[in-house]
Image (cartoon, helix red, strand yellow):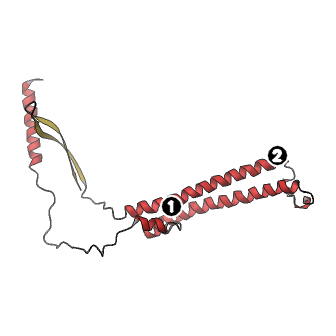
Amino acid sequence: MNWRISIVLLITIILLGHSLSAQQDSVVLNTATPVKTTDSAKVHKHSPTTAMLLSIIPGGGQIYNRKYWKLPIVYGTIGASSYFIYRFANRMVMYRNEYIYRHTEGCESLVNPQLADQNDENIIQLKNNNRRNMEIAIGVTAILYALNIVDAMVDAHFYDFDISDALSLRIAPQILAPNMSLNRPAYGVGINLKW
């Protein structure tokens, strides 16, 4: 590399690094308003454990976290999956009873006339399909119930999380501490995060 370009690059980086290191502290206290001090015993901290325990009853943790808009979602999803459990269980019992009535003497009057055109293998297959669907619906309901609890815990954990406009990130070139083995400064990129 040409030595003139190296000198121009070095001077540019030194000037940029000098302007970055001469910055003032960005935290300024306003002395016109007094700083409030609070007693640590009086401060109510939003507890994820309390939210978890309250969400044992579906929606209780969401009410504790004041996320009322999530209640229809919680009740709708758990209610819908519970309905499918009920529906598939009733149909499974209907097909099971149909098979039992067909093979028990004296129960011919209990045979469902709507299933008269189905053979025994079809009745067993329909019973097994409805049992499988019921088990899937039970699993989905358990997962949705667990998600209700996890959602309440996460919301409670981030309840007091401060999202303000005072967050910033600045990336700029910087001269780092000199490298003693080469006896020259090291160049790099400085990242300043203000929060």
Question: Which of 30 and 108 lies nearest the eye of the viewer?
Answer: 108
What x and y, as percent, mark residue 18?
Answer: 8, 44
The answer to whether residue 192 is above or below residue 177 is: below
Q: Please say if the residues under marks 2 and 1 sit with CB atoms less than 8 Å apart.
A: no
- Name the quarter where the N terminus is drawn: top left
Q: Quadrant of residue 37?
A: bottom left
Q: Please give the name of the residue rendered at 10% of the width and 33% of the height, measured from the top-left corner.
A: 9
Q: Quadrant of residue 50?
A: bottom left
Q: Please give the name of the residue rendered at 71% of the width and 53% of the height, measured from the top-left corner.
A: 131
Farthest residue, direction right = 106
Q: CA distance from mark 2 to mark 1?
A: 41 Å
Circle 2 sits in a helix, a strand or a loop, which is it? helix
Circle 1 sits in a helix, a strand or a loop, which is it? helix
| First along the sequence among labels 2 and 1 | 2
User: Which residue is labeled 1 in the image?
Assistant: 148
Question: Which of 10 and 36 lies nearest the eye of the viewer?
Answer: 36
What x and y, as percent, mark residue 189?
Answer: 19, 40
User: Which residue is labeled 2 in the image?
Assistant: 121
Q: Please give the name of the residue rendered at 80% of the width and 47% of the height, measured from the top-left corner.
A: 122
